[in-house]
Amino acid sequence: MSFKQLGLIEPLLKALKEQGYTEPTPIQKQAIPVILAKKDILAGAQTGTGKTAGFTLPMLQLLSQHKQVGEKPLIRALILTPTRELATQVAESVDVYGKYLPFKSTVIFGGVKINPQLVALKKGVDIVIATPGRLLDHISQKTIDLSKVDFLILDEADRMLDMGFINDIRKVLAILPKNRQNLLFSATFSDEIKKLADTLLNAPKLIEVARPNVSSEQVKQVIHPVDKERKRELLAHLIKEGDWKQVLVFTRTKHGANRLSEQLEKDGITATAIHGNKSQNARTKALADFKAGTVRVLVATDIAARGIDIDQLPHVVNYELPNVPEDYVHRIGRTGRAGNVGEALSLVCIDEKEFLENIEKLIKKDIHKFVVKGFAPDPSIKAEPIVQKRGQQQRGQQSKAPKSHLGPNANQKEPRKKAPSQRGMSHRHRDK
Ligand code: AMP
């Protein structure tokens, strides 16, 4: 089935042709006709499935069916995303696919100056792509008029809820006109998502597509057992030996990401870190340098990496395993896309044994273990629980942390005072 057969109009087909897209992806095949029929949808789709075009194309087409009267455009479509990076990428897609249509759009997110956003809003736009926090600032300052919005998209809704945006989302929903079309995209369907869908969507059509490359044949997964102190040395060795040109490395903390990228630089390997403590400009530059190949290694935390559109990475390295097994699946989904075989390596020390067991349970297979010559773990080293720094913001997913790190009282309802060594390690940290 072609894009034309899906009912898309000529200006969109022309833009798609320029992009070199010949065939719609499964999510596009399913979502586009339903959205064009003005129905609400609840879509299960991750980054990498082509979901962005799946909602952007029909949104642009519907906007073009009702030209506005008056000179200044009014906001008719609102797209909410969890992160600034994702907002930027969606905005780029709107520009690319809408190249031959007369619509104006703008992005609204925190961490950057508010003035350019005010100027854009004042001039008037048809489409706003926003993260919830800064959007609420504009709403409370009355610098944005959402009274004509009749098209709402929540992208990566599960992440928005994970990041604690539910109240912000509800506040935004409360001021939107009641009569509108709603699209909800989420990689997972938790009870919370279903609850949100129930209150938000009107007789939605459910659309689900397979996760791309989840532990698939296209991703070769390997565990390299190694002592914690020697991980950096092993990583530098692998990069140099394999002459890797572009590798995405995951760490569990922002501090760890910074430290590792600095250490790699000292080892003569160009590296940069991306995480929520960096300014928006620094994050954009880090990503651009990595994409352009001027830095070989991008070190990222889970949330910072989420939604970043870097396709077909040959190598993804888990410098530390995530304490939430689902994050492992998200991480390795960064490689092996679009028919290319990718490699996901995990450097695992004895302290992470339990994390690994949880991951293998989730993906329902044992990952191949391979000791790199000269890096065999010292058998005399005993496991120590992994302690996250106190004071780190946390995301509150207690039940998902390994039991052995929670201690015997972990399942009690009333919070008990934890011993100093236990504080703060049962949650994963928050990295906004
Ligand atoms: P997304 O899941 O929206 O993040 O898209 C993943 C990647 O697939 C992006 O780089 C898109 O540009 C690309 N893409 C989207 N639709 C198509 C298509 N029909 N054919 C080829 N590439 C596509």
Image (cartoon, grey):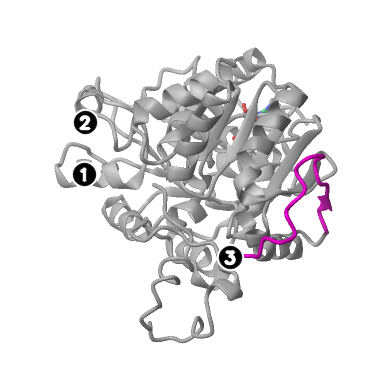
- Say left or right for 363 vs 294: right
Q: Mark 1 near mark 2, Cβ–Cβ under 8 Å?
A: yes
Badge 3 marks a residue whose secondary structure is: loop
The spot of residue 202 in percent (x, y) is: 48, 59
Which amino acid type is shown beneath numbered disc 3? Glu
What is the x, y in percent for residue 250?
Answer: 58, 42
Q: Residue 226 at what x, y percent from top left?
A: 71, 49
The residue sitting at 64% across, 17% down in the picture is 19
Instruction: Report the residue at 15% width, 41% height from top.
Output: 142
* Mark 2 closeness class: few <14, some 14–19, many ≥20 residues within 10 Å: some
Earlier sequence position, callout 2 versus callout 3: 2
* SS at badge 2: loop
Q: Amino acid at mark 1?
A: Asp
The extreme left residue here reads: 141
Question: Majority secondary structure of the magenta segment?
Answer: loop
Asked if disc 2 is less than 8 Å from ligand 1, the answer is no
Magenta stretch bounds? 366-384
Task: Give the CA separation, mark 2 to mark 3.
Answer: 46 Å
The reply to whether dot 2 and dot 3 touch (C-beta < 8 Å) is no
**Would you place residue 282 above or below residue 376 in this image?**
above
Q: Quadrant of ligand 1?
A: top right
Q: Which residue is mark 3?
A: 384
Mark drawn on residue 137: 1
**Disc 1 to disc 2, C-alpha distance:** 10 Å
271 lies above or below 408: above
**Quarter of the view holding residue 165:** bottom left
Residue 132: give x, y in percent of width and height.
Answer: 33, 47
Q: Residue at x 52, y 24 (%)?
A: 265
The kind of residue on which mark 2 rests is Ile
Residue at x 25%, y 20% (from the top left corner)? 71
Label 1 vs label 3: CA separation?
44 Å
